[in-house]
Amino acid sequence: MAAGLVDEDGDEVHLTLQPALTEPELTALRAEYPVPLPAELVDLLSVTRGVDGLLDLDFTGAAHSVEPAELMPAGLPVAADGFGNFWLLDLTPDTTDVAPVFFLGHDPAVLLYQAPDLATFVDEALRKFEPPHASLVDDVHDDRLQHVWQRRPGAIAQVDALSSTDVALRDFAQTLDDAWTLVDLRQRQVGTGIAWGRYGPRTRLARHGWERIFAYAPHQEPRRSWRRLGRRERL
């Protein structure tokens, strides 16, 4: 692995590559996802399945327990900070070459764009151990999450999205009611994202198919009909 890496205290950092995936293991991994694995990921797995000493990097996702199905139907977790926050590849039918990396935080509960591909993400992670130790991974993890949580940039009310000239945005809004807020992450910059836990752990979430257009709304208790209530009381 890269030589000459040091932490901010000047202590040497040692990273170790894990073994590559075998063909049977790669076949099994492919079967876990409803879309193809990006070529970049497959090439990387032919060299190593992860890196010890760097953000718990595991390119198979096996070491990370997180299921953001409502936000990422085929999200593949590749890194973690050890405190319940993860970095995931957002796999879609279109990510056949590379897939973007997103940061999924839980406190605050945000999903932020991190990098356009795995190579960029790993390069930025390594910058943490190269003077002057300035890394976009740290920027997203430590700073930009608060900006999205507190200010919610790019948030679009459902009623406003209904009149959008963007067909996909308008079509998505038509499937929702006025309790929802939309966030369009098709065009994005590092650190932009969605406050997916805006209304607490029961926040409702939605995504417009495989498009990176997301939405959130307060929890809504299911309506109870008087007919069903009366039947239950008689029982």
Image (spheres, rainbow, N blue to C red):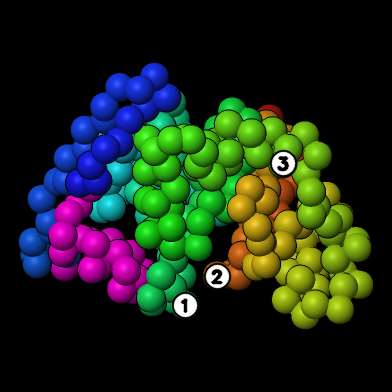
Q: Quadrant of residue 161?
A: bottom right
Density class for disc 3 (Cα within 10 Å; few <14, some 14-19, many ≥20) is many
Q: Secondary structure at mark 1?
A: loop
Density class for disc 2 (Cα within 10 Å; few <14, some 14-19, many ≥20) is some
Amino acid, disc 2: Trp
Residue receiving disc 1:
94
Residue at x 16%, y 60% (from the top left corner) = 47
Residue 172 vertical position relative to residue 179 in the rendered view, above or below: below
Residue at x 69%, y 33% (from the top left corner) = 146
Q: Is residue 18 visible?
A: yes
Gap in angstroms between the C-alphas marked 1 and 3:
27 Å
Q: Position of residue 15 (x, y in %)?
A: 22, 37
Gap in angstroms between the C-alphas marked 1 and 2:
9 Å
Amino acid, disc 3: Val
Q: Mark 1 or mark 3, which is nearer to you? A: 3
Residue 202 vertical position relative to residue 99 in the rendered view, above or below: above
Residue 69 vertical position relative to residue 95 in the rendered view, above or below: above
Residue receiving disc 2:
210
Q: Position of residue 156 (x, y in %)?
A: 83, 57
Residue closest to the eye, 142 or 82: 142
Q: Position of residue 13 (x, y in %)?
A: 26, 30
Q: Mark 1 or mark 2, which is nearer to you? A: 1
Q: Secondary structure at mark 3?
A: helix
Look at the image and give the residue range highlighted in magenta.
27-51
Determine which of the numbered discs, if any, sits on residue 148 in the image.
Answer: 3
Amino acid, disc 1: Asp
Residue 106 vertical position relative to residue 124 in the rendered view, above or below: above
Mark with earlier residue (1, 2):
1
Q: Position of residue 45 (x, y in %)?
A: 20, 60
Q: Is residue 77 magenta?
A: no
Asked if the residue under mark 2 is in contact with the one under mark 1, i.e. CB atoms within 8 Å, the reply is yes
